[in-house]
């Protein structure tokens, strides 16, 4: 069996031109490996089709160049040059016409190109596909995966896909404000924001082995998440990233904003710079873990020799956790201070675990005092269905940083260039990278208008 695949092109109606783009042959005996097109045949057909279509488009464009809008004279040809278009379906060599500048324009340039090929021409589809794959996979694995599916002339190395991704990230940084403004359509009445820090290995071990990245989520009333991430360098980077996320969600002055953190002083400083009037809630999980540590230390007291001391310590710790859960913060801080003084008074006979419990109580008291204004009635919030924990923040740090940059891929990053990659990964996880390309390139993956379908339904 033989199939001949032809491409019919009509520059003008009624004058078709045929091009043979492929020939497929099969034996009469059929097997699972010979059914349909193979990957190699599909890649060859796509590359041949792309070459024929691009060549015809360029020739038609050069032939239909309009005259000067001011004087109406036709542009004179200065010459031709060769350029290579890089696309998803292979590289295509093009012969581009260069035109002399019209005297009426007053331009200092003596000539200009008739096509978008002054700099390395890459189609938006290839940039988008490369950036999306490298945001989810290591650079080398992304290059290998694309090489398995794309024609040979479209394959790229790990450094090439990395450079293309970084260029997309740089453009995302430049148009971040415009993209957030376009996305914010309806105002948001209620918004929950949480952020935390995660550490990434530094490419250069001096002056630091690791650097911190602030990542988190903004949740609206319907539970839709908008992720954000920024390198923590002491500047306004994290604040700007969170502001753009809030703008993307449609936050304004009337939005009820609730911020959840783990009580870190640096995170509280970011919250005060971002939204000083917002309702800040200390994460209950971190409070619970501190009381769990106190209980573990108290359980280390010998129950046979010092059973009374152990029972009293455990009972007071349980009561303290209950007080914080029900919003009695000041009463609990005073109770912990009394318990710490009791540990000092009970050291007639040295008890190592009791001494350690006293040190841990001092640290817990300092932590609670610093965040005393951020501890509401957790039980009341929980019964009302409101968030009291930063579990959604931990998941954001895990999916933005850990899965791609730390845990599975033990990679090292440069703190001065990693922000571009973070922007690409955040847009991919948020599902907004395609919208960004639509904003940059007219006609890129147009969204189908569903209004007629809705009206007919």
Image: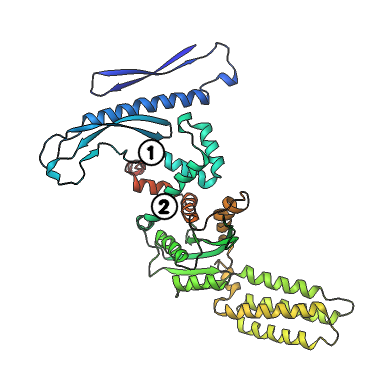
- At a point 23% along the width and 22% down the height, the residue shown is 13
Looking at the image, which is closer to me, 276 or 74? 74
Percent position of residue 168, x then y: 42, 48
Looking at the image, which is closer to me, 159 or 137? 159
- At a point 54% along the width and 71% down the height, the residue shown is 266
Screen quadrant of the C terminus: top left
Q: Secondary structure at mark 1?
A: loop
Classify mark 2: residues with Cα within 10 Å, few (<14), some (14-19) or many (20+). Answer: some
Percent position of residue 236, x then y: 44, 67
Numbered mark located on residue 123 in the image: 1
Which residue is tagged 2? 170
Q: Secondary structure at mark 2?
A: helix
Classify mark 1: residues with Cα within 10 Å, few (<14), some (14-19) or many (20+). Answer: some
Name the image colouring: rainbow
N-term-proximal mark, 2 vs 1 = 1
Determine the CA span between mark 2 and mark 1. Answer: 17 Å
Q: Is residue 69 left or right of residue 208?
A: left
Q: Decide: is 414 above or below 121.
A: below
Q: Is residue 218 left or right of residue 33?
A: left
- At a point 64% along the width and 84% down the height, the residue shown is 331
């Amino acid at each position: 069996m033989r199939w001949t695949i032809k491409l019919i092109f009509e520059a003008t109606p009624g004058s078709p031109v045929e091009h043979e783009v492929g020939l497929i042959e099969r034996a009469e005996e059929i097997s699972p490996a010979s059914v349909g097109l193979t990957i190699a045949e599909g890649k060859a057909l796509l590359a041949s089709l792309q070459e024929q279509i691009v060549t015809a488009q360029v020739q038609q464009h050069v032939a239909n160049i309009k005259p000067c809008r001011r004087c109406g004279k036709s542009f004179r040809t200065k010459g031709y040059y060769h350029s290579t278009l890089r696309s998803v379906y292979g590289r295509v060599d093009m012969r581009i016409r260069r035109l002399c500048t019209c005297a009426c324009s007053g331009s200092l340039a003596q000539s200009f190109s008739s096509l978008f090929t002054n700099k390395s021409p890459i189609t938006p589809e290839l940039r988008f596909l490369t950036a999306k794959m490298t945001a989810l996979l290591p650079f080398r694995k992304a290059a290998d995966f694309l090489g398995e599916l794309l024609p040979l002339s479209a394959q790229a190395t790990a450094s090439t896909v990395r450079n293309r991704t970084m260029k997309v990230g740089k453009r995302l940084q430049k148009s971040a404000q415009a993209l957030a403004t376009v996305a914010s359509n309806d105002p948001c009445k209620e918004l929950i924001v949480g952020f935390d820090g995660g550490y990434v290995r530094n490419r250069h071990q001096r002056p630091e082995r690791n650097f911190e990245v602030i990542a988190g989520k903004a949740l609206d009333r319907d539970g839709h998440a908008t992720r954000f991430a920024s390198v923590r360098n002491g500047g306004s980077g994290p604040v700007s990233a969170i502001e753009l996320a809030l703008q993307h969600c449609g936050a304004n002055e009337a939005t009820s904003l609730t911020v959840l953190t783990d009580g870190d002083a640096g995170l509280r400083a970011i919250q005060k710079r971002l939204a000083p009037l917002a309702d800040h809630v200390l994460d209950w999980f971190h409070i619970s873990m501190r009381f769990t540590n106190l209980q573990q230390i108290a359980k280390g007291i010998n129950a046979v020799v010092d059973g009374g001391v152990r029972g009293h310590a455990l009972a007071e710790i349980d009561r303290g956790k209950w007080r914080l859960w029900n919003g009695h913060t000041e009463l609990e801080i005073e109770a912990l201070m009394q318990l710490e003084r009791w540990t000092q008074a009970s050291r007639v006979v040295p008890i190592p675990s009791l001494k350690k419990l006293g040190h841990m109580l001092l640290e817990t008291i300092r932590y609670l005092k610093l965040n005393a204004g951020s501890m509401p009635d957790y039980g009341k919030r929980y019964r009302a269905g409101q968030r009291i924990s930063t579990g959604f923040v931990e998941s954001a740090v895990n999916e933005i940083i850990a899965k791609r940059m730390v845990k599975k891929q033990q990679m090292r990053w440069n703190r001065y260039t990693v922000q571009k990659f973070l922007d690409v990964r955040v847009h991919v996880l948020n599902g907004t990278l395609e919208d960004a390309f639509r904003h940059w390139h007219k006609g890129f993956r147009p969204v189908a208008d569903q209004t007629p379908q809705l009206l007919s339904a």
